[in-house]
Image (cartoon, rainbow, N blue to C red):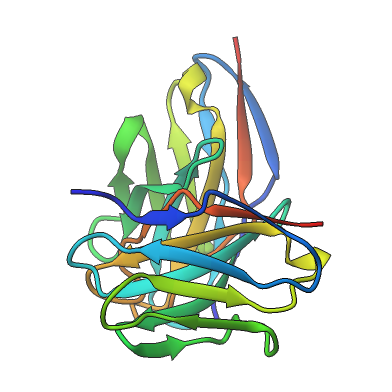
Amino acid sequence: AQSVTQLGSHVSVSEGALVLLRCNYSSSVPPYLFWYVQYPNQGLQLLLKYTTGATLVKGINGFEAEFKKSETSFHLTKPSAHMSDAAEYFCAVSDSGNTPLVFGKGTRLSVIA
Amino acid sequence: NAGVMQNPRHLVRRRGQEARLRCSPMKGHSHVYWYRQLPEEGLKFMVYLQKENIIDESGMPKERFSAEFPKEGPSILRIQQVVRGDSAAYFCASSPLGAGEKLFFGSGTQLSVL
C-alpha cells in the first residue's frame, strides 16, 4: 500500500524567499506523484504531476518538483515566494494508475511580507 | 465547461439525522471519488465509483455510510444517523479516465453535526 509523508505541517517563508515543501512516499511499484494546492474554502487544484519520463516536473505558478527514486522523495520548490502562494499544499501518490490517490496530511505555507 | 459541482456547500444536521451530499462530475467524466478532510489529517479516501458501479470502497466506514453514482444524475454520499465525529469537509473529485489520473475537485461540502 502506498503512503505519503509531508515533513512539516506548517512552513513560513518571507516574500521572495525560496519555497521548499518536502514529500516522501512509499510505493511498491513505480508511483504516480502529484502536488495539489488548496486555497481557503476551495477544493484542490493540481499544481503538477509526475508519471514517467523527465524527473524534474514543472507546474503552474512557477512551482516545480523533482522525483528522486533513490530518496523516495518528490519535494516541491519555487525560487521566489509570492503572497498569493499562501495556501495548503498536498502531496499525493498513486499506484501507477491502479489505485485512487493517497494524500499526505498537507503543509500550510505562510508567506510573510 | 463547468467544474465539479457539489451541493450543498454547508450542511447542518442534528445527531441521528441523515445527511445527503451531492456531486455532479465534470462533463464527460465517468469516474467519481469521495474524500473526507479533517483538520490536521489531510484528505482520506472514502470511495471510488464509476457509473452505476462501486469500484473501491476500502475507505468507507462499514456502517451508516453509502455512496451511489446512478446512470442519470449526480453521485450521492449518504450518511445515516449522523454523529458529531462525522463533522468534516467532504470533497468529491472526478476524472475522465480512472484511478491515478488527474483529479478535478469540487469545492466541498462542510458537514456540521450538532
| Residue at 33% from the left image edge and 82% from the top image edge | B70
Q: Position of residue A113 (x, y in %)?
A: 59, 9
The quadrant holding residue B84 is: bottom right
Query: Is A8 on the left or on the right of A20, as rendered?
Result: right
Which one is nearer the viewer's eye here, B87 or A81? B87
Please state, as top left, top right, bottom left or bottom right, where the C terminus of chain B lies in the image: bottom right
| Residue at 56% from the left image edge and 36% from the top image edge | A40
Query: Is B87 on the left or on the right of B24, as rendered?
Result: right
Which one is nearer the viewer's eye here, B69 or A10? B69
On screen, B25 above or below A100? above
Which one is nearer the viewer's eye here, A45 or A27? A45
| Residue at 53% from the left image edge and 51% from the top image edge | A90
Q: Position of residue A92 (x, y in %)?
A: 49, 61
The quadrant holding residue B94 is: bottom left
Query: Is B76 on the left or on the right of B63, as rendered?
Result: left
Let me know if residue B17 appears in the view. yes
Q: How many numbered circles does the render carry?
A: 0
Q: Position of residue A52 (x, y in %)?
A: 26, 66
Query: Is B77 on the left or on the right of A6, as rendered?
Result: left
Q: Position of residue A85 (x, y in %)?
A: 48, 27
Let me know if residue A3 appears in the view. no
On screen, B27 above or below A88? below
| Residue at 26% from the left image edge and 59% from the top image edge | B26
